[in-house]
Amino acid sequence: MKVKIPQKIKIGTHCYNLSFTPHIHCDEGRYANCNHRTQEIQFWSESPKSIADESLIHEVLHIGELFQRIDVSDPDIDRIANIIMILLKDNLGIEFDWSLIQEK
């Protein structure tokens, strides 16, 4: 089942805009960036789909971590995002459709 990723997601009372950008430090292992001040999540425009999918979950977990005031290490966020993607893709058959997300 395909799920369209919306241009804006709401986590709690906070709305974040999603976009692609060529300006991410992917060589440093970063494929997305979440800016809480501007409430934007940007994804590297050249990212393989599987990495963009998992990066979305990763960044959403960071938003939850910030606003729920919990402390989770980045490696643990990676692990949790991977578990959630396994559940969504391999067990529930969910595939993300990024067609609504534009490059900024």
Image: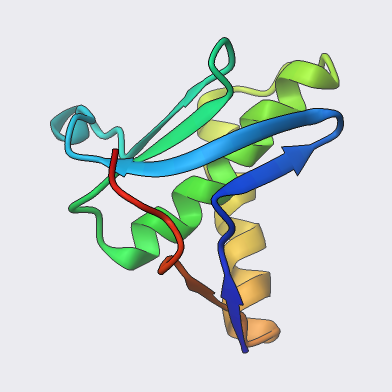
Q: Residue at x 55, y 37 (%)?
A: 17
Q: Position of residue 45 (x, y in %)?
A: 23, 49
Q: Is residue 101 left or right of residue 77?
A: left
Seen as rendered, the residue at the extreme left is 27
Expressed as whole percent of the image width and height from the top left, the position of residue 66 reads: 72, 17
Apparent side of residue 82 relative to residue 27 in the rendered image (left or right): right
Q: Position of residue 41 (x, y in %)?
A: 48, 34
- Work out whether residue 53 or residue 13 is closer to the camera in this orientation and state it: 13
Query: Residue drawn 17% across and 38% down?
Result: 22
Look at the picture and state if 76 lies above or below 92.
above
Above or below 76: residue 73: above
Question: Is residue 22 depicted above or below 67 in this figure?
Answer: below
Q: Which residue is more in the foreground, 77 or 20?
A: 20
Corner quadrant of residue 65: top right
Residue at the spot x=68%, y=72% of the render?
87
Tag count: 0
Q: Residue 63, position in %: x, y?
A: 68, 28
Quadrant of residue 1 in the image? bottom right
